[in-house]
Each structure stands twice: as structure tokens, then as C-alpha cells.
Amino acid sequence: MPFKLGRAVTVDFLGGVALQRIGELFAAEQRRYVDAHPRSLQLTGRGIAGFYDGVPMHWMRDWSMPFPFVVKSAQGASLRDIDGNEYADFCLGDTGSMFGHSPGPVAAAITRQAHAGLTYMLPTADAIAIGPLLAERFGLPHWQVATTATDANRFALRVARAVTGRPKILVFNGCYHGTVDETFVRLVDGRVVHRPGLLGQVTDLTQLARVVEFNDVDGLRRELAHGDVACVITEPVLTNSCMVLPEPGFLDQVRRCTREMGTLLLIDETHTISSGPGGYTRAHGLEPDLFVLGKPIAGGVPASVWGFTDDVARRLHDVRAQTPLGHSGMGTTLSANALALAAMRATLEHVMTPEAYRHMDRLAGLLADGLQTMITARKLPWHVVRVGARVEFVCAPGPLRNGTQAEAAHAPALEQAIHLALLNQGCLIAPFHNMMLACPATTETQVARLHDAFASVTDALVS
């Protein structure tokens, strides 16, 4: 927003910081990055040969750095590049390595399985152990294994439609559920529209989904009253935007409303597994009909799980008994492969432990408190949000209540400058928004390093 100084000077601000200062900092940090990464510049500065846009996956261009650095190795909470730079890693693969890079038990399990076959479309001894582990940990009796959380969400929503006979899905504005088609909608001035940037969309997704603001119980009741919603799919906390916490009692109301209207409830814990060994669901006593968890469930190996209640299982059996044999629309050949199962068992038994979560929670608390103290001391109009081991600073006042407010709070140019400046001081955070994670290997020294870097960057912004 513009702020007038006297008669002649107008200064534009973003997140309480002058745009000119943001631009100056970003330009200086870009030069600093280039100087510190000569080998990566040589290999990736003009793009990697053979790959579209010069990268193996197009979102690798979404980092704030001028070109991606090339990773040499990662262990625990530290990451090294081929130029000899070492980073305290608070991104951790955007949750995929939430329990650290190459946890010992997972690495050992992968090594063992590598000599016994990687995939063969049949169960293993690890599968026999995993089924009861999932039921005990997350509280649902029936489970399936998929390759990504996107897959798991798609399959679960297909089941929800099959057993309810209803066509529509309800999502909350600003939600994140991977690349599930029905979730690529949003509210604009009360209208449901496609998310901008969606490529190749030939069907009208607004005909398949209803959209409500997070924390809006009245809106939820109004949309469910149509009687055509098979499933409400939600994160317990909006996480892939500027983070939005549920207001007291909201998730209880979601459960109550869905039951009253005969609608199933799917809880997607792919990011909120940071809350504890059983996720936000177990930590807060939620009672979903369907449950999805991806990203870190196999310690970094691609895998996901989705579970459901006895009632859903019974209704699914009834539907399948009346359905001819053939393609169900659920599967993928590499789902539940032997390598993923071995890594998943090791993660569940030896890595996702209460002791690990206690450490993660304590370090994340230290991180969040320190960031908020520095923000307050510098009188920046920002706030810090935390869900267990997951921390985010938001460059706007808070708390935020819904997806519309979260979108308005997003400050891309400011966040980009901060991310690159932190990276140049040896601290890697997620390129999307301002997310940070503490893992079992994170140390107090690394948290202090991030605090020092954040203090330096914010001082530069407000100087």
C-alpha cells in the first residue's frame, strides 16, 4: 500500500516493508548466491539439458534462487551442495523428509529390500506388519496403500461417491490436497471458479465441487443442505497457504454437520502429521470416515496410505458385489511395492516415535517463539503460526480465519527476498510460503542459526 511522505515522496509497502528495500535486498542476495554457487551455475544456470524448462520437475523453478543448486548429499537435518555449501534444512523436502534425510532404520530397510526385489504386485512380510500398525496408530480398521497422497485422495473420493451415490465433493477455499481435480476450485466474490493457472482443463470442475470458507459453519450447513455432497475433504489446518488454524469447535461442527446430512468426512493429514504420531486426528480426537496420509509415511520413499471405517468398508463391499469385474479406477501398478512397504514399516516402527515427536515439538516451539520475538521487536505487522513440528511466519497481521484472508496475506516478492537471504546464510526453508519443519535430527544450534539469519534479514528490511 502507498504511504505519502511530505508532498513529493510516495513509498509503496508490502507486509510493512518498503518495496524499494525489498527489491534492493533481493538483487543483492541474487548476486551473493551466484558468487557462492559457481559449479551449480555451470551445470544448471542455463537449464539441465534434456529437461523441459531445464529441470526434472517444473516446480523446481519455484525456488527464490536464480538457478537451482545441485545437491551432493543430505543427512539428518543438514543438506550439502556441490559447491561445498552446507544448509540447516528446515524445508525437509516440503514434508517428504519430515523425519530427517535417510533415517538409519529406513536406509537399512531399503538396503535389505534392494537385494530381495523392488516390486512384484504381491504382499510381503512388511505388509503383514503394517496393517495392524496403521489401525493402531490412526484408529481406522481398513487400509490401502498408494504411491502419493494425490492418488490416495482420488481413490478415497471415488469410494465416497460409490458408497453414497452422490456426485459432489465439498472443499474449503484455499485447501491443499495434491493435484486432485475437484480441489482446484476457489471462491471469488462468492462464486466458485477454477484456480488460475490450471492447465489443460476440459471439464467444468465447478460442477463437481462445492466450496466453503474454512471456519464458516453456516456456509458449510448451507452447501450440505443440497443433499448432493458425497464427501467433505479437508485438512485439519489450512497449510499450503498462509497457515489458517481451525477456530475452537469448528472441526467438531464439521463432523456433526456431515453426519446429519449423510456426508462422509475425509481428513487429509499429509501436512498436519506434524502434530504427533497419530497426526492431528489422534491429537485432537477427530473421527473421520476416511483418512489420508502421504509424503513422510515411508521416510522419503514415495508412498501413501488411506484408511476408512467399518461402515464404509461394508458399504463398499455391497457396491462391489453389484459391480462387474474390471477397472475400478483405483490402483497404479507400483502402489504398495515391496520397497515402499519396507521403508514404511521402518518409519512406523522406528522413526515416527513419541520420543521423536517430543523433540520435534520442543525445537519447533523454540523456533516459533524466537521468530515471534524478533517480529515484535522490529514492529513488523507479521505473526507466527505453529502446528506441532510445523512453523510458519506470515507477513501480515493474524490470526487468519479463512482461505480468502490467507491469499490476501501472501506477499510473494517479500517472501522471495527473505527465502533467498536466509538461504545465503545457510538456512533452507520451503519455497512455498514460509514453512519450516523441525525433524528428529534438528539441533538447537540449527534453530539458533535460523534465528540469527532471520534477525539479520529483518534488520536489513527495516533499516
Image: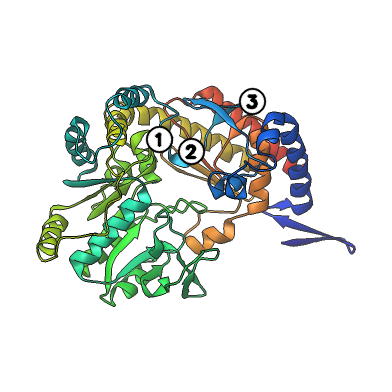
Name the residue tied to disc 1.
300
Residue 321: image x %, image y %? 9, 62
**Camera sees residue 223:** yes
**Is 51 on the left or on the right of 273, as rendered?**
right
Name the N-terminal-most of marks 2 and 1.
2
Residue 198: image x %, image y %? 51, 64
Q: Is residue 225 above or below residue 237?
A: below
Residue 440 in which image quadrant = top left
Name the residue tied to disc 2.
93
Mark-to-mark CA distance, 2 and 1: 8 Å
Name the N-terminal-most of marks 3 and 2.
3
Amino acid residing under circle 1 = Gly
Q: Which mark is residue 85?
A: 3
**Camera sees residue 433:** no
Could you classify mark 3 by the number of other residues whose Cα lies within 10 Å: few (under 14), some (14-19), or many (20 or more)? some
**Is 134 on the left or on the right of 75, as rendered?**
left
Residue 67 in which image quadrant = top right
Q: State which quarter of the image contains the C terminus.
A: top right
Residue toward you, 84 or 190: 84
